[in-house]
Image (cartoon, grey):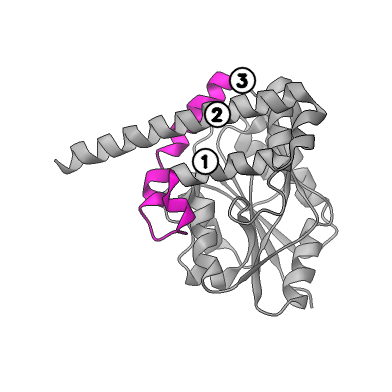
Amino acid sequence: MKPLVSIIVTTRNNEATLDACLRSIAAQSYEPIELIVVDNNSSDATPQIAQRYTELVFNKGPERSAQRNFAVRQAEGAYILIIDSDMELGPEVVAACVQKVQSTPNTQALIIPEESFGQGFWAQCKRLERSFYVGVDGIEAARFFDRKLFQRVGGYDEHITGGEDWHLTDRVAAQAIIGRIDQVIRHNEGRIHLKSALQKRFYYNKGFLTYYQSEGSPAAKSPASSVLTYYRLYFSRPFTLLKNPAYGLGMLFMKTCEFGTGALSLLAARRAKSEAEA
């Protein structure tokens, strides 16, 4: 008998992308699958869309780490796959994940590579950026887990919103082998507006302070070193950057803005923490 896989999707006002996400889950070649959607007080049609696909629709906050942990507590699957509501699974993703963990000794978690798509110039820049990360340990994070292992390491740290995927992957890697598959998750970036993207980055990067100060990987504890690692990666493939110079330059500009915004966010978080402790 094939093991049950619980797929977890967290949402908040995601009516624009959720139907495609859930359709991709319904179209998986693998069975049996249990779909769990955990919303966070959406004001749009997100809950109604989720209810078309599963009865397991819950409401929980305040952030995605808490939503995910709550979903795992509801799950009955031997394995769990955790994705965002703007992601779409290739039809063989779950089958490939189960085959990999069952055929590879001690592999209890998996990285699934992502491809971005969307509309407009900045979405194409993001698509180019994500292409650099495929197969790079320390940048990609695990999404498929043995449920008992997930629970044993304590799941996501609910104090971290921003860096929580890497933080969990670090702790899982200390106890089990993390493998990877070739099937992909397609990440719908929609139409990216640079200003709103940077505002979002500022918000989530505040959570990185908690990650950097946690017992994470040594590289993660040095933000400056981490930034240089990204630039070294980009310039290690100059032909990829130059294949479409406009997107290459746009990507570098966007990442520089994001890193600058991230630095400001970390400074703000450190200042707030110091004032709270004073």
Q: What amino acid does circle 2 point to?
A: Thr
- Which numbered disc flags the more N-terminal residue, 2 or 1? 1
Secondary structure at numbered mark 1: helix
Residue 101 - label? none
Label 1: which residue? 227
**Left or right of 278 in this view: 83:** right
Residue sitting nearer the eye, 39 or 95: 95
Residue at screen point 65% across, 78% down: 106
Task: Decide if residue 256 is on the left or right side of residue 134.
Answer: left
* Residue type for callout 3: His
**Label 2, residues with CA under 10 Å away: few <14, some 14-19, many ≥20:** some
Disc 1/disc 3 C-alpha distance (Å): 22 Å
Looking at the image, is mark 3 or mark 2 nearer the viewer? 2
Kind of residue at disc 1: Val
Residue beneath the point at 58% across and 73% down: 176
**Is the residue marked by circle 1 packed among few (<14), some (14-19), or many (20+) residues within 10 Å?**
few
Q: CA distance from mark 3 to mark 2?
A: 15 Å
Tell me the residue that label 3 is attached to. 193
Question: Where is residue 94 drawn, in percent x and y?
Answer: 77, 60
